[in-house]
Image: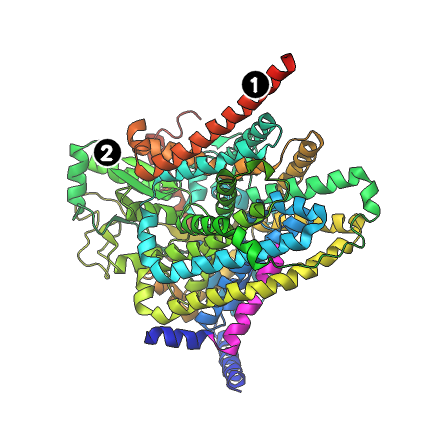
């Protein structure tokens, strides 16, 4: 009985929302005859991960405005090259949306794929990059870390997820600006890097706070420095890299793209639908739990495209520095 | 204590018990079907748990995990086609036993061992989770390397007559494991410039192909069996008697401890646990030469270990938010959809939920006894189906399952390629198991060695001189040398006798 009532109430709420939505004039008009069949969203990372939850929760909120079924397909492996390949193999008709990540730009630098074959849709999230040590670590501040690294070149061990990743780029950029020599030991699976730092086998972890909130709250991991514009509200004592003289603001961003050649009216309409979804409580409550509401991440199609170009330049410079691109 | 009582009340409600039973059934069936497994099952179910109470949803996922880890052994024993990667080692002795007409007994041993292994690990997890998680964290790259080497030594005792052939098969597996983007430097290796191979050779389609397709091709060639080799063979699952179980007590206890311990480690899961469980059973057995011919220890060893790994893998997940296996990594998503973040704070903030999951897993393992008997009976019926019909059905499932892992056609081609490999292995009397062991353990062996050496600046001393890693390595290398020694001594004596 209770279930029934719930159902009726939620149905009523939905109906009200649908009517309300149809009453509003959206920024971009709905293209004629689109969408008329299910849309596929391709995610190059596994079910239950940060990117997967991002696309699922966002499209969950956008579903009622999109009006057709949206299916999320997880296509993991090879840093997204396979998923990119799949998306590029589909027609540019607006029925395939891609969870675009910094890896696509890095893969372009490495000659594995070409981000210019995609058309930017929107960027939604801007995550926070933070360095941590384990609770028992001798390091109390980031300055101590830098001092130790200067006294013991090549001794300090950093970890993050996968080689040639945004993690490695930010760590190496930090090392470059701080003038220190360090080692980077990547893991394919992020939890293994957490375990290595918790167990005291490696010194410093790079990670976004959302996935390790519980470990931070339990004081098993201590944030040392945040690569954000301003100090983060949950940790007012943790300085930003900028404050201590290293002008680096970075962090994983999560956005969407489509195959180049997708009609602009579809791109613009989807962008306006997604903008609305990104403010929907069903999305924002999930984003808030992972601290994804702290930095503005929203970029429309045109701005997102410019953002790709500037990020690409930064990545290329660091990867060239690291010698990854030498032989090519 | 109060928290336990209220957790018990949460679990012992009709809806909760129903979800646990449902989960175990779904898991066992998925596990038994080649190509489908618990990782996939939990991933598919997460969207449904969104609408459920967190405790119910998580109990359902945990139950699928427990059932799926066992289910694979059913098809491994009945058809020599491991339904899930965890069961690859169960078929080594399970299938030969079934061929002797004792399929029912083999299934009985598998069910009992799984239940006991699962219960043991859940008990351990309930009692000493936080402490164990701490111990698990002390494992670094050298320890992982030592474990991988210990499991690889199994190859030397698997070959039966031809150790040389076993080594060749093992090396092929190790080679296949190197294909793809390197985990340390991101260099492309053996991809021949194709994008398809960048993702590497996933061991799940490889296992499905090498065993299932290889078997089907070999059977098709035999021809004669196709008309109904399996007709009129009734399989009724017989649970082992107490006396028979008591004879296996050391095997079960050893594998339960090994499985739980392996499960706790973040880098390795139930498949590795099963291989190590099997290899240690062989290592400490008084008659190692009988393995592979259908001995109960050969079923009990891996099957106890892989189910014990389920409870073990939950330890770091619940206490640290670090998954101990592929399936638990997916289960994290089941927490996140409810806005829960597994980790130390969850224990403090939601102890009731945590204890409910413990109890639910305990109940799931008991239900597994019944679900196991039921599903085994169901699948045993397929033995009555003519192979000319059953073979193609397995073929189709193998293709669908391989595609489903990553929605990638490459995995299907890999599955077929490994099927051909499996067929030629059979034809030229090479054992398949060493290849699979090499493929599964190759990445762990290589990466832990390279990472560990990089961390110690390529100094062997600090890498090897660690109490746990050193001990495991000495035992592993010692037993291989002993194996080689005894083989050569026997050969030497034999050839001397020939001369005389």
Tag of residue A155: 2
- Give the label, 1 or 2, closer to the camera: 1
Badge 1 and badge 2 both on one subunit: no
Dot 1: chain letter: B
Q: Position of residue A15 (x, y in %)?
A: 53, 79
Does the residue at mark 1 contact the one at mark 2 (Cβ under 8 Å)? no
Q: Position of residue B442 (x, y in %)?
A: 49, 35
Dot 2: chain letter: A
Q: Quick check: B32 left or right of B6?
A: right
Quadrant showing the N terminus of chain B: bottom left
Tag of residue B238: none
For mark 2, does the 10 Å Cα neighbourhood hold few (<14), some (14 to 19), or many (20 or more) residues? some
Is A235 located above or below residue B405 in the figure?
A: below
Q: Position of residue B404 (x, y in %)?
A: 60, 51
Secondary structure state at the residue bearing disc 1: helix
Q: Between residues A81 and A93, which one lies in front from this camera angle? A: A81
For mark 1, does the 10 Å Cα neighbourhood hold few (<14), some (14 to 19), or many (20 or more) residues? few
Is B428 located above or below residue B1 in the figure?
A: above
Q: Which residues are magenta?
A: B12-33
Q: Position of residue A88 (x, y in %)?
A: 57, 45
Q: Between residues A323 and B469, which one lies in front from this camera angle? A: B469
Tag of residue B492: 1
- The type of colouring in the image is rainbow
Q: Quick check: A143 left or right of B457?
A: left
Residue, x 36% and y 31% (percent of image)?
Answer: A320
Secondary structure state at the residue bearing disc 2: loop
Quadrant showing the C terminus of chain B: top right
Q: Quick check: B461 left or right of B387?
A: left
Dominant secondary structure (helix, strand or loop) of the stretch shown in magenta = helix
Magenta-colored stretch includes residue B175: no
Q: Between residues A47 and A119, which one lies in front from this camera angle? A: A47
């Amino acid at each position: 009985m209770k279930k029934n009532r719930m159902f009726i109430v939620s149905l009523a709420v939905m109906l009200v929302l649908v009517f309300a939505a149809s009453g509003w004039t959206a920024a971009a008009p709905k293209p004629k005859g689109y969408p008329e069949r299910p849309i596929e969203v391709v995610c190059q990372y596994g079910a239950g991960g940060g990117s997967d939850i991002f696309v699922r929760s966002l499209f969950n909120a956008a579903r009622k405005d999109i009006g057709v079924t949206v299916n999320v397909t997880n296509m993991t492996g090879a840093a997204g090259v396979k998923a990119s390949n799949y998306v590029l193999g589909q027609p540019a008709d607006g029925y395939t949306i891609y969870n675009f990540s910094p890896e696509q730009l890095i893969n372009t630098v490495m000659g594995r794929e070409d981000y210019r074959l995609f058309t930017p849709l929107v960027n939604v999230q801007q995550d926070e990059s933070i360095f941590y040590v384990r609770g028992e670590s001798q390091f109390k501040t980031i300055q101590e870390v830098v001092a130790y690294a200067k006294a013991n070149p090549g001794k300090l061990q950093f970890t993050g997820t996968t080689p040639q990743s945004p993690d490695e780029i930010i760590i190496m950029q930090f090392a470059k600006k701080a003038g220190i020599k360090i080692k980077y030991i990547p893991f394919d699976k992020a939890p293994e890097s957490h375990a290595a730092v918790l167990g005291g086998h490696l010194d410093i972890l790079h990670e976004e706070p959302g996935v390790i909130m519980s470990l931070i709250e339990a004081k098993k991991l201590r944030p040392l420095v945040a690569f954000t514009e301003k100090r983060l509200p949950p940790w007012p004592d943790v300085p930003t890299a900028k404050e201590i003289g290293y002008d680096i603001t970075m962090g994983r961003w999560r956005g969407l793209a489509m195959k180049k050649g997708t009609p602009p009216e579809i791109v613009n309409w989807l962008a306006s639908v997604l903008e609305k979804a990104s403010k929907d409580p069903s999305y924002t409550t999930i984003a808030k739990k992972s601290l994804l509401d702290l930095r503005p991440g929203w970029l429309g199609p045109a701005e997102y495209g410019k953002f790709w170009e500037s990020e690409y330049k930064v990545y290329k410079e660091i990867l060239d520095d690291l010698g990854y691109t030498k032989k090519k | 204590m109060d928290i336990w009582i209220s957790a018990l009340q949460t679990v012992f409600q009709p809806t909760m018990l129903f979800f646990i039973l449902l989960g175990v059934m779904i898991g066992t069936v998925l596990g038994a079907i080649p190509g489908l497994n618990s990782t996939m099952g939990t991933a598919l179910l997460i969207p449904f748990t969104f609408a459920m109470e967190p405790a119910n949803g998580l109990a359902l996922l945990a139950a699928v995990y427990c059932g799926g880890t066992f289910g694979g052994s059913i098809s491994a024993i009945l058809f020599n086609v491991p339904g899930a990667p965890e069961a690859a080692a169960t078929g080594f002795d399970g299938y030969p036993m079934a061929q002797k007409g004792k399929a029912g007994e083999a299934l009985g041993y598998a069910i009992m061992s799984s239940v006991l292994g699962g219960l043991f690990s859940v008990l351990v997890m309930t009692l000493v989770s936080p402490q164990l998680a701490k111990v698990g964290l002390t494992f670094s790259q050298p320890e992982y390397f030592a474990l991988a080497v210990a499991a690889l030594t199994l190859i030397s005792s698997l070959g039966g007559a031809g150790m040389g052939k076993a080594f060749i098969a093992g090396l092929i597996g190790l080679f296949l494991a190197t294909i793809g983007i390197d985990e340390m430097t991101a260099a492309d290796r053996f991809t021949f410039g194709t994008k398809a191979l960048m993702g590497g050779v996933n061991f799940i389609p490889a296992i499905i192909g090498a065993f299932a397709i290889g078997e089907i091709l070999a059977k098709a060639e035999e021809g004669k069996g196709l008309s109904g080799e399996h007709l009129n063979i009734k399989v009724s699952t017989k649970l082992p008697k107490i006396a028979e179980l008591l004879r296996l007590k050391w095997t079960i206890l050893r594998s339960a401890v090994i499985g739980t311990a392996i499960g706790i480690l973040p880098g390795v899961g139930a498949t590795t646990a099963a291989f190590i469980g099997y290899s240690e059973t062989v290592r400490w057995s008084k008659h190692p030469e009988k393995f592979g011919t259908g001995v109960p220890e050969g079923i009990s060893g891996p099957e106890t270990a892989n189910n014990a790994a389920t409870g073990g893998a939950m330890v770091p997940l619940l206490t640290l938010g670090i998954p101990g296996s592929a399936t638990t990594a997916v289960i994290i998503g089941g927490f996140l959809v409810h806005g829960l973040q597994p980790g130390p704070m969850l224990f403090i903030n939601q102890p009731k939920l945590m204890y409910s999951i413990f109890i639910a897993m305990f109940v799931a393992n008991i239900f597994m006894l019944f679900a196991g008997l039921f599903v085994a009976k169901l699948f045993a019926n397929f033995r009555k189906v003519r192979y000319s019909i059953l073979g193609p059905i397995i073929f189709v499932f193998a293709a669908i399952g391989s595609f489903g892992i990553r929605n990638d056609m490459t995995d299907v081609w890999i599955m077929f390629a490994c099927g051909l490999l499996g067929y030629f292995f059979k034809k030229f009397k090479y054992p398949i198991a060493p290849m699979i062991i090499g493929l599964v353990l190759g990445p762990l062996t290589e990466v832990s060695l390279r990472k560990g050496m990089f961390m110690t600046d390529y100094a062997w001393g600090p890498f090897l001189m660690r109490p746990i890693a050193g001990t495991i390595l000495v035992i592993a290398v010692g037993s291989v040398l002993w194996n080689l020694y005894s083989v050569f001594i026997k050969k030497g004596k034999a050839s001397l006798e020939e001369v005389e």
